[in-house]
Image (cartoon, grey):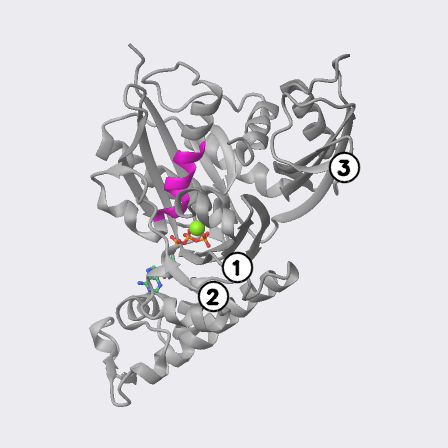
């Protein structure tokens, strides 16, 4: 009888490290989430590790937490990659079909995708994902899956996601120190899109906005294809910092004020509504206007959303995506954000629910903050389903990343196989 598989997603966020443990039952073909763990992040800025020791300690704490909850020993994980160093490039590959009778095989598919990533990258950059968009056979384009078709010349248009090499090395060093083997590295907002965008969203044209602490991820899909993946280097921690500066409080107090009294619309609040700072810090005795706090917040959130809109403008999709906006990340919990984003982006807006397609008794994962963690687990589980599992049974995750080529190859298939 086939045995269960466990998958671990590790989301190394700027504010919080989040761990999600998924169990796949091959008898029912069901993936369920069986545990989570989290710890405040230290040593990270805008998604990038700036202090190795502190980051190691945060990741270890989050893993311990998940191990206690599940009773499992977690030694493999699929890990998120994030930061302003991420870049999307379009590329083109072309090959001659290898079989004499002209039938296109999976091998040709791999060769042409491989050809599309043969490009000159700057020394400090490397490829994280190569995602084929569509193929052309003998000049006839728009083909999703050419395997089995006949032709002489096979071409592909791919989206390449490149990342900074020093960033990756630091992340890998950190994970090694934690004692964790990496199954795969996945761009965090792509993982979030995996858990929070439906097939229909991706088909009709939608944008996922990941309102993280140090970054805001923007991912656009249309006709089932990835159009854009970019990272705006401003996030919800900047909102907190602005409050701390505006009220002259500590960052911790500002964060608590934001979580308790935060909103996006100052006009919706009573003019005389006040916040007692002593509620958060015994050393403070001032009263501050809640409207003033919300005005500070609104200014920064407006900046974030106009940066997102600029990204949409670059691909001519501002106000132009019928599937609308799906908000994820901790910032999606901010009261008023749905209406505010609808007004600023001129699109329908909903908050993503990472648990919507999964069975789980763990309520925590319905928080949009868990979009990336849940998406990472789904990412590897879906790949296993497509390519046959490694047969490691109860041992956690699977060991595929010894050969980075293998892991990339799996990503290539990610977005286009039905
Ligand atoms: N109810 C809320 N209102 C406003 N902001 C919130 C709320 N809940 C969480 N946040 C903010 O969400 C952020 C954390 O979200 P998340 O865990 O998605 O970020 P992260 O993944 O750690 O960061 P990044 O993706 O940028 O590396 C924090 O800045 C926190 O202040
Ligand atoms: Mg995040």
Mark 1 and mark 2 lie on one chain; the one further toward the N terminus is 1
Residue 141 place in picture, x, y as percent? 71, 38
Front label number (3 vs 1) = 1
**Front-lying residue, 371 or 80:** 371
Q: Nearer the viewer, residue 85 or 285?
A: 85
Answer few, some or many: residues within 10 Å of disc 3's Cα (few below 14, many 20 plus, some between 14 and 19).
Answer: few
According to the image, label 2 marks what residue? 347
Q: Secondary structure at mark 1?
A: loop
Task: Decide: is 412 above or below 84.
Answer: above
Does the beta carbon of the residue at mark 1 sit less than 8 Å from ligand 2?
no
Determine if the C-beta at disc 2 is less than 8 A from ligand 1.
no
Badges 1 and 2: C-beta atoms under 8 Å apart?
A: yes
Residue 52 sits above or below residue 29 on the image: below
Q: Is residue 57 visible?
A: no
Which of pointers 3 and 2 indicates the residue nearer the eye? 2
212 to the left or right of 306: left
Q: Position of residue 218 (x, y in %)?
A: 52, 55
Type of secondary structure dominating the magenta stretch: helix
At mark 2, the secondary structure is loop
Asked whether disc 3 touches disc 1, contact meaning CB atoms under 8 Å apart, the reply is no
Q: Which element type, helix, strand or loop, lies under badge 3?
A: loop
Residue labelled with disc 1: 321
Q: Is residue 326 visible?
A: yes
Q: Quadrant of residue 161?
A: top right
Tell which of 62 and 210 is nearer to you.
210
User: Which disc is residue 119 wearing?
Assistant: 3
Residue 216 pos. (x, y %): 49, 58
> In the rendered structure, which segment of residues is drawn in magenta?
370-379
Q: Callout 2: few (<14), some (14-19), or many (20+) C-alpha neighbours within 10 Å?
A: some
Residue lying at 38% horizontally and 42% vertically, measured from the top left: 373
Task: Pick whichever of labels 3 and 1 is earlier in the sequence.
Answer: 3
């Amino acid at each position: 009888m086939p045995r269960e598989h466990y998958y671990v997603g590790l989301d190394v966020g700027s504010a919080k490290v989040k761990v999600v443990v998924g169990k796949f039952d091959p008898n029912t073909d069901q993936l369920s989430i069986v545990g989570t763990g989290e710890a405040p992040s230290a040593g990270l800025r805008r998604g990038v590790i700036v202090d190795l020791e502190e980051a190691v300690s945060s990741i270890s704490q989050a893993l311990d937490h998940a191990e206690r909850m599940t009773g499992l020993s977690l030694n493999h994980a699929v890990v998120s990659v994030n930061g302003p160093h991420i870049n999307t490039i379009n590329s083109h590959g072309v090959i001659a079909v290898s079989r004499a009778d002209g039938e296109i095989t999976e091998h040709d598919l791999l060769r042409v995708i491989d050809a599309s990533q043969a490009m000159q990258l700057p020394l400090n950059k490397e490829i994280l994902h190569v995602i084929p968009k569509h193929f052309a056979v003998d000049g006839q384009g728009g083909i999703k899956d050419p395997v089995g078709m006949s032709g002489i010349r096979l071409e592909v248009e791919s989206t390449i996601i490149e990342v900074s090499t020093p960033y990756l090395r630091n992340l890998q060093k950190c994970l090694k120190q934690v004692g964790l083997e990496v199954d795969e590295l996945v761009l965090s907002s792509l993982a979030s899109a995996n858990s929070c965008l439906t097939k229909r969203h991706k088909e009709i044209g939608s944008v996922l906005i990941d309102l993280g602490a140090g970054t805001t991820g923007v991912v656009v899909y249309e006709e089932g294809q990835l159009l854009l993946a970019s990272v705006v280097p401003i996030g919800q921690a900047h909102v907190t910092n602005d409050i701390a500066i505006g009220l002259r409080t500590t960052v911790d107090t500002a964060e608590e004020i934001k979580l308790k009294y935060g909103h996006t619309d100052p006009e919706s609040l009573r003019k005389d509504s006040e916040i007692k700072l002593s509620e958060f810090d015994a050393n403070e005795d001032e009263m501050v206007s809640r409207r003033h706090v919300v005005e500070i917040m609104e200014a920064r959130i407006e900046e974030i959303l106009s940066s997102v809109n600029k990204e949409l403008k670059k691909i001519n999709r501002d106000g132009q995506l019928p599937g609308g906006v799906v908000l994820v990340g901790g910032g999606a919990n901010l009261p008023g954000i749905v209406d505010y984003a609808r007004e600023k982006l001129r699109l329908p807006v909903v908050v993503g629910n990472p648990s919507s397609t999964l069975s789980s008794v763990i309520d925590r994962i319905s928080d949009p903050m868990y979009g990336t963690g849940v998406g990472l687990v789904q990412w590897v589980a879906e790949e296993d389903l497509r390519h046959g599992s490694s047969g490691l049974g109860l041992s956690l995750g699977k060991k595929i990343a010894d050969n980075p080529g293998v892991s990339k190859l799996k990503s290539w298939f990610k977005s286009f196989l039905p």
